[in-house]
Image: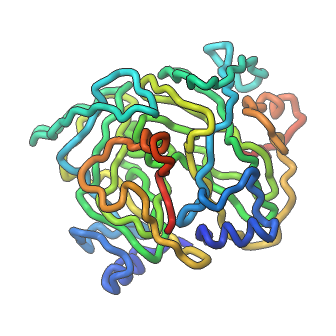
Amino acid sequence: MIITGDEILKYWRSGEIMIDPFTSDRLEPNSYGFRLGQDLKVYDDPILDSAKKSDSSSFNITDDGFLLMPDTLYLGHTHEKIGSPNFAMTLYGNRSTAAMGIWIQHSAPLGHIGSFGVWTLEIRVTQPVRIYREMTIGKIAFWCAVGKPSPYVGKYPASGRPVPSRISEEFLGGSGQKGGG
Amino acid sequence: MILTGSEIDRQVSLGKIEIEPYDANKINPNSYNFALGQELLTYEDNCLDVKTTPRVSTIKIGKNGHILRPGRLYLGNTIEKMGSGHFVPTFSARSSIARLGLFINLSASLGDIGYFGQWTLQLVAVQPVRVYAGMNIGQMMWWVPSGSIQLYDGKYQNSMGPCCSRIAEDFDTGSRDVSAK
């Protein structure tokens, strides 16, 4: 079951939901409204290879904002560190950003129980849009789970910045298919 | 937990889910089909800024339909006014629509308990596709929440027709997409 805003507050207080920084003003009827962090990453090579590590360049969103261009994938991140040992999470854009033609994730809304950190956002735009750091950009929902939770042991634990895809590690025989966000 | 079609029908008859106009033939196994309205909005300026309210132009979909072009955002709306004070809504394209390469929302599928009105659809086509007013374009689902409920009281409440993004107001007044009161 998806939990209401009141319930998010209750479990934040009990430590079963972590959101940092947290303000109760950002509680929504059935989600928490998160903000955009200040770093963006863009892949350097226009052709990506899922079996190879892709180099990327970093950009800072300054006070003047940052102009996102179509046909480019930007990896951004949530301003907040968000996670939970007990609840599964799903992440969405909000009406306002979507109606500006902005995607913030690409068919991958599910976050795993046990993950905690800033969430990498896969940002793309339909037409050029200037965005600003710490703008409210999306919302995260928390879901009760059935069954005993197992700890998250994926490739993206405790992320602090946007993290490019690490799928190439799966081709090296190292890491399994347990990637979060 | 997601509501089944027969439960959606039952909750409509109990007044706990509002769908107007309502047609029991549009019930699916776990969702309700909604239809595309007659108006589309596009932004007049190619380059947008989330701090500036965009200027819009209106397209009326004629009886021969309207071709949606790639690389452009069109805002449409559901013909139906929909909402619930008891269940959490999410919406998606019908799979027949997705198979044409048409997005109807941009990573923003989660609605709020207590929102009532027509829903703005963010239409983006992967390749040119002709759409028609009144076609069944998407489906609304409802989920049972856990916890006490604070109803949506945000700036899009009771929307009619396609609504352009009001994200600029977040910067003017600090009001956000969603607020629970």
Which image quarter: residue B16? bottom left
Residue B96, position as x, y percentages in the image: 36, 48
Q: Is residue A33 above or below residue B123?
A: below
Q: Is residue A25 above or below residue B86?
A: above
Which image quarter: residue B118? bottom left
Residue A118, position as x, y percentages in the image: 74, 43
The residue sitting at the right extreme is: A174
The residue sitting at the bottom extreme is: B14
The residue sitting at the left extreme is: B63
Q: Is residue B99 visible?
A: no
Report whether B15 appears left or right of A36.
left
Report whether A61 appears left or right of A101.
right
Q: Nearer the viewer, residue B43 or B1?
A: B43
Residue A151, position as x, y percentages in the image: 87, 58
Q: Nearer the viewer, residue B128 or A151?
A: A151
Residue visible at 42% across and 69% down in the picture: B114
Please state, as top left, top right, bottom left or bottom right, where the C terminus of chain A lies in the image.
Answer: top right
Residue visible at 48% across and 51% down in the picture: B175
The residue sitting at the front extreme is: B173
Residue visible at 88% across and 33% down in the picture: A173
Report whether B61 appears left or right of A166.
left
Residue B18, position as x, y percentages in the image: 32, 73
